[in-house]
Image (tube, coloured by chain):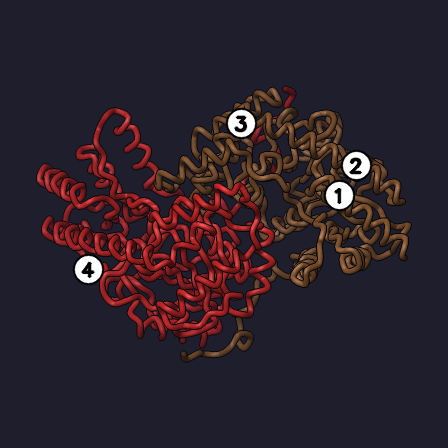
Chain colours: A red, B brown
Amino acid sequence: MPDFGTSGDSMSLRVAERISGIQPFYVMELLRRAKELEADGKDIIHMEIGEPDFATPQTILKAALAHTATGDVKYTPAAGLTELRQKIAAFYRRRYGVNIPEQRVFVTPGATGAFLLALGASLNPGEEVLMADPCYPCNSNFVQLYDGKTRTIPVDADSHYQLTTKLIERHWSAETKGVLIASPSNPTGTLIPRAELQKTIEATRRLGGCFYSDEIYHGLVYGEKAATALEFSDDVFVINSFSKYFGMTGWRIGWLIVPELFIEAAEKLSQNIFISTSSDAQHAALAAFDESTLAELEDRRREFEKRRDFLYDALVRLGFDIPIKPAGAFYIYARCAKFTDDSFQFALDLLENEGVAVTPGKDFGLHEAHHALRFAYTTSLDRLAEAVRRLERFLDAR
Amino acid sequence: MPDFGTSGDSMSLRVAERISGIQPFYVMELLRRAKELEADGKDIIHMEIGEPDFATPQTILKAALAHTATGDVKYTPAAGLTELRQKIAAFYRRRYGVNIPEQRVFVTPGATGAFLLALGASLNPGEEVLMADPCYPCNSNFVQLYDGKTRTIPVDADSHYQLTTKLIERHWSAETKGVLIASPSNPTGTLIPRAELQKTIEATRRLGGCFYSDEIYHGLVYGEKAATALEFSDDVFVINSFSKYFGMTGWRIGWLIVPELFIEAAEKLSQNIFISTSSDAQHAALAAFDESTLAELEDRRREFEKRRDFLYDALVRLGFDIPIKPAGAFYIYARCAKFTDDSFQFALDLLENEGVAVTPGKDFGLHEAHHALRFAYTTSLDRLAEAVRRLERFLDAR
C-alpha cells in the first residue's frame, strides 16, 4: 500500500482546536484499572457508573420486539414518530399540567442528541453559557463543540449546588448567550427549588438569554416532585431522556422541547444531523408511558430511594461531609476533606486496595473538586452494604 | 402559566447564525404533497426515497431480537463494541485487502454520526471543504454545523460527476481544510475511477489537506468494485454505514475510520456527543458480515442492478439525457433540459398529475440543477414499469 506521508508531517492534517478544550474523563483511568483488576479475578463494586442496574422494563422490550420482528426498521420522520411526540406532550400535560404542542417536541438520539440540537440551533461561536461548578462534564463539551465558551460558577450547599438568580446576574456579560441548569443535578443529586427555578428563568429572560434545562433525572426524585422549566415559560429548551428514569440507556433515545421560535431550526438541523432517531428505540418508547410501565418504574424509584437512604446514612457515619441529603438522581456527592486533599488519588487507592470504584470530583469541575467524590447507587443494597464495609476498612487502614 | 416575554422580543433568544446557511430540502415539499394525495386515496410511486425497500436481513433481525430479549440493553463503549470494531476491520481486510487496526474504527449513530465525528475532530470555524456540485446536501450542512465553509465545484459527466486532481488544485485556497468525495455518488450514482481516487488523495495530501471519503454506497455497485480511500493512504477519514448496503436504515448505525493521529480526538468526542451508539443496533450489526447475510445482500444487489438497467433504458428511451450509466448506489441523475428549464416545477407537476415522486436537482446543488432530476430505484420492477408508463403519458401530454 503506497502512502503519501505519515500523520503529523502535514500542514492541516491536524486535530481541530475545539478538541483541546474537551477534557478527558478521569474516571476512564479508573475504569481501565477496574477492568484489569476484574480480569485478574478481583471483585469490583461499581459505584462510578451513571446507569441504572435495572433491565429495560418488559412492556418496553415487548414493544421493541414486536417492531423488530416485522423487519420494517426504516427511517422515521426526523423529529420522531408523530405518535411518540404526542405521547411525550401528553406526559407533560398529565405529570406537570403544561400544554406543549407536539410540534415543539423533538425525539433525539439520547439527551446527547437533544443537547446537540438545542445548542446547534441557538449558540454562535464565541458565545458563553453559564453553568454551575460542579456539573456534568459533557454539558460544557457540547458548548465547546460549537466553539462557544462555558463560564462555570462555583456553587455550594447553601444554593443546593445550583445556580441562583444572584449568581446569574453577577456573572452575566456581553458574551453570555444563556444559562444551563440541571435539576436534579449530576453529580450532586440536588434539586433547584421550584421558586428559585422560576426566578432564574425570569432573570435569564430579563437579561435576554436562552434557558437550557437538563431534566434527565426527572422521575427519580425522593421527595417533592421536580418542576419542569416549562411550568414557568414556553421560551425554554428542555432536555430529557428515556435513559435514566425509563431504564433505556442503551437504546439511545431522548427528547428536546424547543421554544416555538426554534421549531424550524430544530427541524432543519435534525434532518441533517440525525436523519432520524432509531426506529426500534422509538417504537419501544411508545410503551414507556403505559400505566403498567409507570407502575414498574415507581417500584424502581422506591428501590433507589432505599439505596440513597442507606448509603447517605452510611457515608455520614463514616465521616464524609454531605451538607444536603440529595433529593434526586442516583448520586451522592460527598466531601472527603477529612480524609484527603486529593480525591482522585483517594479513588485510585480505594479501587486498588478494596475494589470499590467511585468517580473523582475533578470530573465535574474545579471548585472544591479535590475534596469531593461521587458515589452512584446503581447497584443493589447488598452490594452497597459490602462497599460500605470495604470503605470502612479502607479508612481504618489509612 | 406565567410567561416572561414571548419568542422574538428578546435580545438573544435568536436562532444561531449557522442555521440560515442550512438549506431546507425541497423534496420535503413534494413529500408533504405526496402524503396529502395519498390521504385522498391516490396511488403514489415513490422514487424520491434514498432508502432500500428491502427489510433488514433475517440474520441481522435474529441477532437483534436475541439481544433485546435479554433486557440488558446498556451503554456500550463510546467507540463501539470491541467485537464489532474487529469485525469491521476484518471486513476491510477481506473485501479490500487493507489492514486497519480496530482502534481506528469508530461505530457511530449512522453515517451522520460519522460525519459529526470526522468534521468535529478536524474542522475549525472558517475553514473550507471542497465538494462536488451536485452532491448530497447534508454533507455541506455538517460543515456549516461547525461554522466551516463549503466550496462546491461544478462537475460534469466528463469527470464522472466527481472531483479531479485538477479541480482540487485549481480551487485550493489558504482557507481550504480538505476535500470530501462520495463514490458512488448520491445523486449521480457514478464512481470515481480507482486511479483518479488515488491521484486525488495524493494531491490532497500534497496540499496538506484532510481527505474525507463517503463510502456509504459501497457494496451497491454494478461493475468494477469500488475502491476505498484506505487502499491508498492511512491518513484519510472514511465514512460508511450499515444503512444502504446492509439494509439497516432505521437502526441508525454506521462507522468512521480515522487516521491514527485522530484516534484520541475521536474518542473524546464520541464519549461526549454519543455516549454510545444504540446497543441493539450494534448487536444486530454483529451478524451483518455473516456469510449468509452477505449472500442475501448479493441477491439484493443483483435486483438493484436489474432495476438500474430497466430504468436507465426506459429513461433514455423517453428522451432524458444520462451521459454516464450510473455504476452504483440506487439513483439515476437524469438531465431533463429537453422537457423543462425548471425541474422542480416538473417534479411538482409529475407528482400532481401522475402520482410519481422524484427529487429535484436543486436539492443537490446549483450547477445545472434546474435541468436535473434524481430517480431512486428503491421500489420494485413492477412499480418502476408503472412509473415509466405514467412518465411517458405525462411527457406526451405536455
* Horizontal relation, residue A209 to residue B369: left or right: left
| In this rendering, the label closer to the viewer, 4 or 3 | 3
Number of labels in the image equals 4
Please give the residue where the numbered disc 3 appears in the rendered image.
B289
- Label 3: few (<14), some (14–19) or many (≥20) C-alpha neighbours in 10 Å: some
Image vertical order of residue A56 relative to residue B208, above or below: below
| In this rendering, the label closer to the viewer, 4 or 2 | 2
Q: Are marks 1 and 4 in contact (CB under 8 Å)?
A: no
**Residue drawn 65% across and 25% down?**
B232
Q: Chain of mark 4?
A: A
Precedes in sequence: disc 2 or disc 1: 2
Give a yes or no on whether discs 2 and 1 share a subunit.
yes
| In this rendering, the label closer to the viewer, 1 or 4 | 1
What x and y, as percent, mark residue A292?
32, 56
Give a yes or no on whether discs 1 and 3 share a subunit.
yes
Amino acid type of the residue that numbered disc 1 sits on in the rendered structure? Leu
- Label 2: few (<14), some (14–19) or many (≥20) C-alpha neighbours in 10 Å: some
Please give the residue where the numbered disc 2 appears in the rendered image.
B310
Give a yes or no on whether discs 3 and 2 share a subunit.
yes
Please give the residue where the numbered disc 1 appears in the rendered image.
B384
What x and y, as percent, mark residue A320?
15, 51
Please give the residue where the numbered disc 4 appears in the rendered image.
A325
Q: Are marks 2 and 1 in contact (CB under 8 Å)?
A: yes
Residue A352 picture quarter: top left
Spatial CA distance of label 4 from label 2 is: 70 Å
Q: Chain of mark 3?
A: B
Amino acid type of the residue that numbered disc 4 sits on in the rendered structure? Lys
Residue at disc 4, secondary structure: loop
Residue A301 vs residue B157, the one in the foreground: A301
